[in-house]
Image (cartoon, helix red, strand yellow):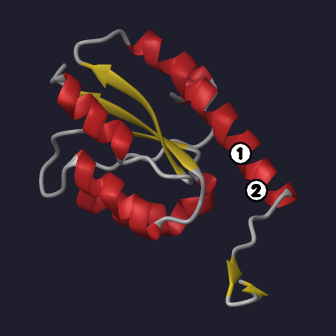
Amino acid sequence: LKSDGFERVLVANDGDECLPLLQAYGEKIFVMTLNLRMPRMSGFEVMRYLAGAHKQIMAVIMVTGTGDLKVAEEFLGLGTANILAYDYFTKPFEFEELIPRMREAVSQVEAKRQMSIRYPMSIPHAGKEI
């Protein structure tokens, strides 16, 4: 990935290793690839964690050996306003196919982050904005 122009590449071998990286580099992470099946914590479990705890806008690309449409739909359903369930790759695939999708995801995250800075969302609550 570095040879394809990505400045910082962080690697976690499973979901448990991923969480401290998210906490340490949260705002610097624009796109994450997740394997559906990982030891100790699945890709779906990481997505659920992100939805509840990660506040920065980021994109997730799921990589899996299963082409089951229900699995892809579940992944897409785990996306939120800040956690974009961006793409779903079924193994085997050519690595060169992933690079342009990652670049597109980074561009989309950059644009969405800029929009959130320009137009912060205010939520009315009991007559006050919070």
**Local secondary structure at mark 2:** helix
Q: What residue type is labelled 1?
A: Lys
Percent across and percent down for residue 31 are 52, 41
Q: What residue type is labelled 2?
A: Ser
Residue picked out by circle 2: 116
Is 37 located above or below residue 124 in the figure? above
Seen at 56% across and 65% down, the residue is: 55
Is 100 located above or below residue 15 in the figure? above
Is 128 located above or below residue 111 in the figure? below
Between residue 105 and residue 9, name the one nearer to us: 105
Residue picked out by circle 1: 112
Query: In the drawing, what numbered circle is on residue 55?
Result: none
Numbered-mark total? 2
Taking 43 as reference, is 50 left or right? right
Q: Is residue 78 visible?
A: yes
The reply to whether discs 1 and 2 touch (Cβ–Cβ < 8 Å) is: yes
Quarter of the image with the C terminus is: bottom right
Taking 14 as reference, is 39 left or right? left
The answer to which quarter of the image holds residue 124 is bottom right
The answer to which quarter of the image holds residue 92 is top left
Seen at 59% across and 45% down, the residue is: 30
